[in-house]
Image (spheres, helix red, strand yellow):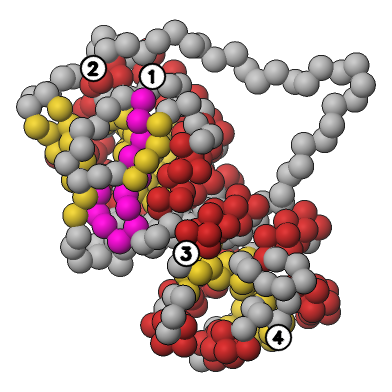
Amino acid sequence: MPKTRVIVVDDSALVRSLLAEIINRQPDMECIGAAADPLVAREMIRNLNPDVITLDVEMPRMDGIDFLSKLMRLRPMPVVMVSTLTERGAEVTMKALELGAIDFVAKPKIGVADGLRLLAEDITDKVRIASKAHIRKAVVPAPAAPGCPTPARPAVNSSPLGRLSTEKIIFIGASTGGTEATKEVLMNLPPDCPAVVITQHMPPGFTKSYAARLDGLCKIRVAEARDGERILPGHAYIAPGGFHLSVERSGANYLARVQDGDPVNRHKPSVEVLFKSAARVVGPNALGIMLTGMGGDGARAMKEMRDAGSYNYVQDEASCVVFGMPREAINAGAAHEVLPLTQIAGKLVERLRSTAGMSTNRV
């Protein structure tokens, strides 16, 4: 079995050495080169043709984002970003994921050597996943020819959803590739849609920046979930990194529950925790969405949602970065519809309109 060939790009000699050591300890991968800046990396990639690169976000001569943008346009390949646990690092990482990076590892600001050694399993897992991921080429829209109108998007029924929005809740689970997939769904939901509750596998320090980025792009309001807050229509709530998110009922209201606890399926936040609460508390008023991601987190709980009366959408293989979580949900019998990513929001809203007045208001 050929090994996964990795090039490490980082301006720190210590980080380059540590990452090379971590990669070379794995029987199924090898570090075939290490570059101190993107200009050196460019030649290495051309000459060595790696399977995956790890890329520092902030470097001299050309920063990681500029390099990634050029790379994904000219020679798309699997990239795992190495970010710093800072607000600036989080914002730049979100941009990198938009540009097509598969995933990221967050290195600590201090104690880098010990921190990276503790992250060794996480780093090598992400390199493995990246080596098998579907790569999407960065698309720059071509300018319209003179005199040619820009093609219009299909007309969307914009009639208000009304009372239905207060009864239904949309639940989304995602992992690798999920930051962009979730963005695609949320950007196509109307401002009066039901509340959306989201678990995206993401470490502490990054979900706040992610939520703020989405809030500026979507018609609905998006924020990190806060323990005990009321879940309202027209709002999306993202599980904070390092905490589980679930929902509970208090009288006529639904509340967010943000809690520490052991990882579930190796994850915290875990989709399993969120979806189990959806099955238990929301039942037939839940709508489930499983997006791209590695592993099987949330698949069994999504089947519980279906058994409790939820209607569930699962992203199809062709549009996934990694088909693991969607495949497991399908195999568990949890899916009602398996759809390309770009169709999920539209189909969901269509269903909401067609079932208006048929919802079950459980107390």
The residue at which mark 1 appears reads as 192
Q: Answer whether residue 284 is magenta in the image.
A: no
Q: Are marks 1 and 2 in contact (CB under 8 Å)?
A: no
Q: Which mark is residue 33?
A: 4
Q: Which residues are magenta?
A: 234-246
Q: Tell me the element at label 3.
A: loop
Position of 183 with respect to 60 (left or right) is left
Instruction: State the CA–CA distance, disc 3 to disc 1.
Output: 34 Å
- Quarter holding residue 77: bottom right
Along the line of sight, the residue nearer the viewer: 87 or 77: 87
Asked if residue 312 shows in the view, the reply is: no
Picture quarter with the C terminus: top left
Foreground label between 4 and 2: 4
Q: Quadrant of residue 16?
A: bottom right
Q: Position of residue 52 (x, y in %)?
A: 64, 72
Neighbor class of circle 1 (other Cα within 10 Å; few <14, some 14-19, many 20+) is: many
Separation of disc 3 and disc 2 at Cα? 44 Å
Q: Is residue 245 covered in magenta?
A: yes
Depth order, front residue of 283/203 = 203
Closest to the camera, between mark 3 and mark 2, is 3
Instruction: Please state which amino acid type lies under the numbered disc 2.
Output: Ser
Amino acid type, label 3: Thr
Gap between marks 4 and 1 measured at Cα: 51 Å
What amino acid is at disc 4? Gly
Check if mark 3's residue and mark 1's residue have beta carbons within 8 Å: no
Q: Is residue 358 left or right of residue 130?
A: left
Q: SS at mark 1? A: loop
Up the image or down, 129 lies above or below 220; here it is: below
Q: Residue at x 61, y 67 (%)?
A: 57
Q: Which mark is residue 86?
A: 3
Mark before the other along the chain sequence, 4 or 1? 4
Q: Which percent across, then down, holds residue 279? A: 19, 39
